[in-house]
Amino acid sequence: MPQPLFSGTLPVIGAPAPQLRYVKVDKTESSLADHKGHVVVLLMFPSVDTSTCALETRTFNKLAAGLGAHVLAVTADLHYAMKRFCAAEGIENVEAGSDFRYRDADGWGTRIAEGGLNGLLGRVTFVIDKEGVVRYCEVAPELGAEPDYDAALNAAKALL
């Protein structure tokens, strides 16, 4: 399935990252700003209840161990679904967050604007530097395609 139409414009490489607030699996609120001073690999995708999104989260969880960057996975899933998934899969190196309350992903241009997944997030990977500037962005060629893990990790490592 090709990437559907998004409802906005992706951030420009080299520009400050847009605001991103989210609800964590423990129901507390957090934001991208809370990670300032750290390199962040930001994963946005439709739902942890799909096979590719689950695989992406598990893979980044393994790859993030010892990376030195913070890895965030933000979806439109409720935090309950993300908590269930993270507990069942042993996700410890990826901070999972839900965009359901704030819909700040709209400012990132990643919300799906058509079809049966309208309102969910598309599969996009970002790397944000320690100052909060977007340094890498990959839109997966198809919604069901995994991201380029090596490219994202190399972009993050170059900023550490």
Image (spheres, rainbow, N blue to C red):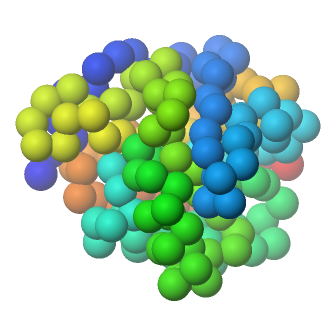
For the residue pair 68 and 92, the one nearer the viewer reads as 92
**Residue 3, horizontal then vertical, whole percent:** 21, 41
State which quadrant residue 83 falls in.
Answer: bottom right
119 with respect to 11 (left or right): left
70 with respect to 113 (left or right): right
State which quadrant residue 16 falls in.
Answer: top right
For the residue pair 141 and 24, the one nearer the viewer reads as 24
Can the viewer see residue 73? no
Q: Residue furthest right?
A: 37
Residue at the image point whose x is 78% and y is 30% from the top: 33
39 with respect to 16 (left or right): right
**Residue 115, horizontal then vertical, whole percent:** 9, 36
43, above or below 36, in the image: below
Residue at the image point whose x is 51% and y is 34% from the top: 101
**Residue 132, horizontal then vertical, whole percent:** 76, 27
Can the viewer see residue 57? yes
For the residue pair 58 and 150, the one nearer the viewer reads as 58
**Residue 148, horizontal then vertical, whole percent:** 45, 57
Residue at the image point whose x is 33% and y is 67% from the top: 49
Residue at the image point whose x is 33% and y is 50% from the top: 46
73, above or below 36, in the image: below
How many marks do you count on the picture?
0
